[in-house]
Image (cartoon, grey):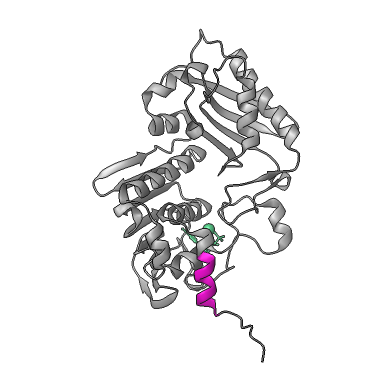
Amino acid sequence: MGKIIVLDENTSNKIAAGEVVERPASVIKELVENSIDAGATSISVDIKNGGISYIKVTDNGSGMDEDDVEIAFERHATSKIKRAEDLDSIITMGFRGEALASIAAVSSVELQTKTASSTYGMYVHVVGGVFKEVRQTGCPVGTTFIVKDLFFNTPARYKFLKKDSTEATYISDTISRIALGNPNIAFKLTSGKSTLVHTPGNNDLKSAIFSVYGKEILKELLEVDYQDERFKISGYVGKPESARANRNYQSLYINKRYVKSRTVSYAVEQAYSSILMKNKFPFFVLNIELNPGLVDANVHPAKMDVRFADESYLSRAIYMAVSKALNSSSLFNPVSVP
Ligand code: ADP
Ligand code: MG
């Protein structure tokens, strides 16, 4: 008798959830990225207990059709790609079709959504991957997800969570990073009565930086504006005197997706090498726009890592872009404070 069985869907979703959903901040990242993909211009997030007991994400995006509200929770169910070739030209944040299935496998999820063309909205309630309720409802155009009791059915994961305030800090950091990459969208993060992040969504990166880091940073910013055959690099770097003791103040976006790249951090730091002390790290918020075919976002389910087709070319371009900003924006001529 053979010993191998194929796991049922609920069990495999629970396992897969381990890769996508590590903590409340990862749930929020996935839900907010879905809102961005839905074309939202305003996204609000409310949390309780650092998101462990309660997360609510509301957007004014496209909403979902009645026909899609159940299948959306299936694994590998996505409206964003159709075939493998599409992976070479991804312009959306999501594409794996894993997030909703994973989140719903390990929490209680309520969805309320309505498209502009539908006369009524839909309400769906899923607990631990099991549908409890699917019905029509009245609601505005757009989508709201409420996620409660994260990891209620995976005690090992639950135990691994940090205290509420620490989880709230991770969430605040996540929203801030996403907001800096999408200055055209208004973000609001509240925890009970306190507002943790609030950006205007006026499509001005400097305003978003101001909202996240406060007024002080504004006079330290040098604009980056560089283009060659492959890349358009834009954003801001900090003057040398604003350098920090760690790399937490570095945000990099590839085609609007927040990523971490040692290659890019080193290339930026190289441009500062003669003017920065050791163990000081420059502030930056940089966007690199490139042909989606030249970058592989499909490395890890959380998609924070990317691979570039030609790392040394990229390093050079970053180095040039930052050097240009450091040289041309004379330190005697600071950028204006709005
Ligand atoms: P992916 O984002 O990789 O497609 P998800 O599991 O995150 O996978 O979402 C599944 C599908 O549900 C999406 O492809 C999209 O069609 C739909 N969806 C999820 N969230 C929203 C939202 N906020 N607004 C509109 N549609 C959504
Ligand atoms: Mg998604």
Q: Is residue 10 magenta?
A: yes
Q: Residue furthest top?
A: 332
Q: Position of residue 30 (x, y in %)?
A: 49, 55
Please give the range of residues in magenta: 8-17
Q: Position of residue 36 (x, y in %)?
A: 50, 50
Q: Between 263 and 62, which is closer to the camera in this rendering?
A: 263
Q: Is residue 96 left or right of residue 107?
A: right
Q: Between 111 and 96, which is closer to the camera in this rendering?
A: 96
Q: Position of residue 82 (x, y in %)?
A: 67, 64
Vertical order, 259 against 248 (above or below): below
Q: Main secondary structure of the magenta part?
A: helix
In this rendering, does residue 141 appear at all? no
Specify the quadrant of the image occupied by residue 135. bottom left
Q: Is residue 279 left or right of residue 145?
A: right
Taking the spot 59% from the left edge, 29% from the top edge, the residue there is: 234
Image quarter where the C terminus lies is: top left
Q: Is residue 2 left or right of residue 147?
A: right
Taking the spot 69% from the left edge, 56% from the top edge, the residue there is: 87
Vertical order, 251 against 215 (above or below): below
Q: Is residue 118 magenta?
A: no
Q: Position of residue 33 (x, y in %)?
A: 50, 52
Q: Between 323 and 166, which is closer to the camera in this rendering?
A: 166
Taking the spot 52% from the left edge, 10% from the top edge, the residue there is: 331
